[in-house]
Amino acid sequence: MTEHLSTIDDAARSLRAGAITSVELARAAIARADALDERLGAYLHRTDEAALAAASRADDELSRGLDRGVLHGIPLCVKDIFATADAPTTAQSLALESTWGARDDAAVVGRLRDAGAVLTGKTTTMEFAIGIPDPEKPFPLPRNPWSDDRWAGGSSSGTAIAIATGMAFGGPGTDTGGSIRIPSAYCGTTGLKPTFGRVSSEGCFPLATSLDHVGPMARSALDCAHLLDAMAGHDPRDPHSADIRADPVADAIQRGIPGIRIGVDRLHHAADADVTGRFDDAVAELERAGAIVHEISLPHYEAVTGAAGVTMFAESFAQHRRRITERWNDYGRPTRQVLALGALVSAATYVQAQRVREVGRRGLATLFEDVDVVACLTAGSGAPSLTGFDFLSIMTLPVFAAYWNGIGFPALSLPIGFDDDGLPLAMQLAGPAWSEATVLRAGHAYQQVTDWHRQVPPVALGSATP
Amino acid sequence: MTRLPTTDDDPAAAALRVRLAPLEPDDDDLRVLLVLDPALQAIDALLTSIDVDYVP
């Protein structure tokens, strides 16, 4: 059986057709984790028994005609930065007090449970969603399922690994500088950073509050749309949650893209020749699907990316200032180094960064009068090697995600093929604020004519099935 | 026994320690931060070069 390696949309159809049960899906996900998790480091805490009980309830409800929607009975995992009522929350750190997550579900977790999702456990991250894999600390080291000597990307590492290998169909991630899109890109999965404020971050340990975005991760753009529809909506408990009406997106994304205007930015996304070749192929596919494509240049790209960087350093240091002053050695070395950078950012620099972000938004608003979607690379290479990987190397990786955090507009990362080493590559599709339906529509149209998102790492094909 | 050089021998490192106080980075931490501090200054210069006078 290969249902666990399909999409949420496919599995939901199979459930309703009686071809499979939620318990069978959950057992398959558990078997996959039994076979692969020790090697790949996806989970910090598994909730197998609770997942099977939730799956059994879902089967019972569906058999009685109580259908909570597409996510009902679907196994999902939760990044260990979100509080959950039935499992501890560590943020993968020895410095987080155990009392922090002892509470009800984070808002987004509660919404997924209400939608009938079956939660399989808490997945690995980088410490507080900002460190890097740290073998000196007593936590699993997330490894890339396509080549386990490579980084899985971060910080939503475990969720991307779990999706790629069938340990779960999807889950919520967080993205402050690319933490949904980078692991999605390196692991060959799909992830959406929505518009700032579209999904509540209540119950999620903060990193940099003006840049933090909660969003969906899954195998396909359509699955991300299903997840977003369950996760999004105003939440008065989150001061950044936007109180505006945002229509559901899953039904709206299936209309194709004839006439949609796509601006392609190559200027700010330097990459190896094999990577640019795959990107050229992807743009050509979008054009064949009916898009009108022309070259653009993202306004103030370097300045907005720099502004996002210093904002993240300053805000994350402010978040951790008391704790890191008292418990310096409890933090992983790379984490404390990046947090300490925030102590070196002046107030004037921080304020200037916020004004530059606004300049960038205004420039993009003008650009989006002429295009509906921007296409660009997510990263300029496949996943880097874990050998010799340190904080300095992560700071120089060719990744192109932080610009969209600084701006706050939606950006989707989706797979576009493989590099010469067989590692997944990805592009971003981004749009103006609240344009998730358009961005996902373009991604879905691309995935209707390609099957990169359905590729499965050999390690997952070779492991035990129930 | 010859003592390995530490950041205490470096005036720039000593100045950085002052800016980071009360954080207490060890020499390995400080070496990384010494590399990245100029990068932060370069970003600051880039940001300062952007005309933001019309932004409230």
Image: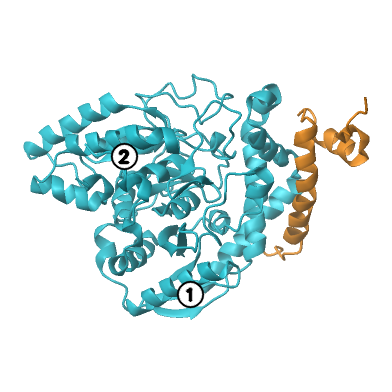
Chain colours: A cyan, B orange
**Who is closer to the viewer here, A291 or A394?**
A394
Q: Position of residue B21 (x, y in %)?
A: 80, 30
Q: Position of residue A261 (x, y in %)?
A: 41, 76
Does A324 sit above or below residue A62? Answer: above
Does residue A232 appear anywhere in the picture?
A: no
Chain letter behind tag 1: A
Q: Residue at x 30, y 34 (%)?
A: A119
Q: Is disc 1 placed on a helix, strand or loop?
A: strand
Other residues around mark 1 within 10 Å, as few (<14) / some (14–19) / many (≥20):
many
Does residue A207 appear anywhere in the picture?
A: yes
- Residue A76 is marked as 2
Q: Mark 2 or mark 1: which comes first in sequence?
A: 2
Name the amino acid, label 2. Answer: Leu
Which image quadrant for residue B25?
top right
Which image quadrant for residue A75?
top left
Q: Is disc 2 placed on a helix, strand or loop?
A: strand
**Who is closer to the viewer here, A186 or A112?**
A186
- Residue A263 is marked as 1
Q: Residue at x 76, y 29 (%)?
A: B23
The answer for how far apart the CA atoms under marks 2 and 1 are is 34 Å
